[in-house]
Amino acid sequence: MSIRDGNFDSGAQSRPFKMPRIMIFLFFALALSASAFAQQNALSAEQRLEGLLTAMGGREVWAKLPGVRVTAIHHTSEQRLPFKNVIWNDFQTPRFRVEATSAEMSRAFVWQKNGAAWAKRENGTSRLLNENESIEQGRWWESNPYRTLQRLAARDPELSVRLIEPDRLAVFRRDGTRLCWFRLNQLNEPVAFSTWDSETGTIFGPLKAADSGVRHPKWVASADGRWRVELLDFATVREKMNVETEQPKAR
């Protein structure tokens, strides 16, 4: 008899239990995942760093870069229209230039440690950055992820790495200050990044290759969704970075 007929099958208790196939699959999937996670936990910071550099195109390629020019489209809650940013970032000399343009805006600014740091607005007028602004831009240059990767690839003795979580690789200055951190997936690709003492990461999208062989995220976005950036071009240079730093003259 069956349960449906109102009677228990008298032989039901004597038959061996058979685990459904889906449960067997899930069991092995979880076991493999746990094993992979344990292997990641066992990796040292140096092994994770080597994996990160390999995922980004290789230590040798990054170590030779004197700078990059990044062209990107920014979408932000603070601007009505998307705008294009072009950033010239010199890894060797403390300086960078940014130009932001759309149908409604045209701005530029330059930061340099030795020389004038200035900003220009749509009306063509320019002003010098104040001391606090200059300090903040200097901190941005120092902790920039691409410059940091170049320094790590070149084995800069001023930097060291340490795992602060099994999947979070932190970079420290010689004085013990945390410069930045990278959160890595199991392929050692960066999926998030942040600087200094911030625990809120910028999200990194999947990687793509530039013409030089280095790899970079296709896009990045804030954790709160207030801005996102699509990287259109990632141009590397093989010689000294050329950055126009002269302040525009007043009209």
Image (spheres, grey):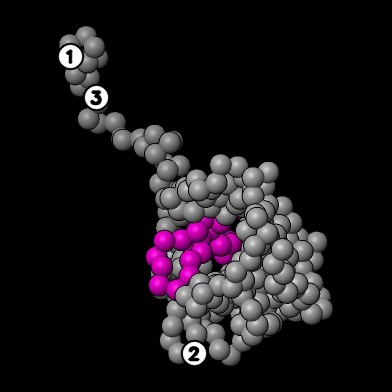
| Front disc: 1 or 3 | 1
Is 201 located above or below residue 82 in the figure?
below
Residue 58 picture location, percent across and down: 70, 71
Q: Which mark is residue 174?
A: 2
Q: Considering the image in quadrants, where does the N terminus appear?
A: top left
Q: Is residue 194 magenta?
A: yes
Residue 161 picture location, percent across and down: 50, 80
- At 78% from the left and 74% from the top, the residue drawn is 242
Instruction: Tell me: 21 left or right of 155.
Output: left
- Between the residue at mark 1 and the residue at mark 3, the CA separation in whole angstroms equals 12 Å
- At 48% from the left and 70% from the top, the residue drawn is 195
Instruction: Name the kind of residue labelled 3 in the image.
Output: Gly
Q: Is residue 203 magenta?
A: yes
- At 41% from the left and 68% from the top, the residue drawn is 198
Occupied quadrant, residue 38: bottom left
Q: Residues within 10 Å of mark 2 (few under 14, many from 20)?
A: few
Instruction: Name the kind of residue labelled 1 in the image.
Output: Asn
Question: Dot 3 corresponds to which residue?
Answer: 11
Question: Dot 1 corresponds to which residue?
Answer: 7
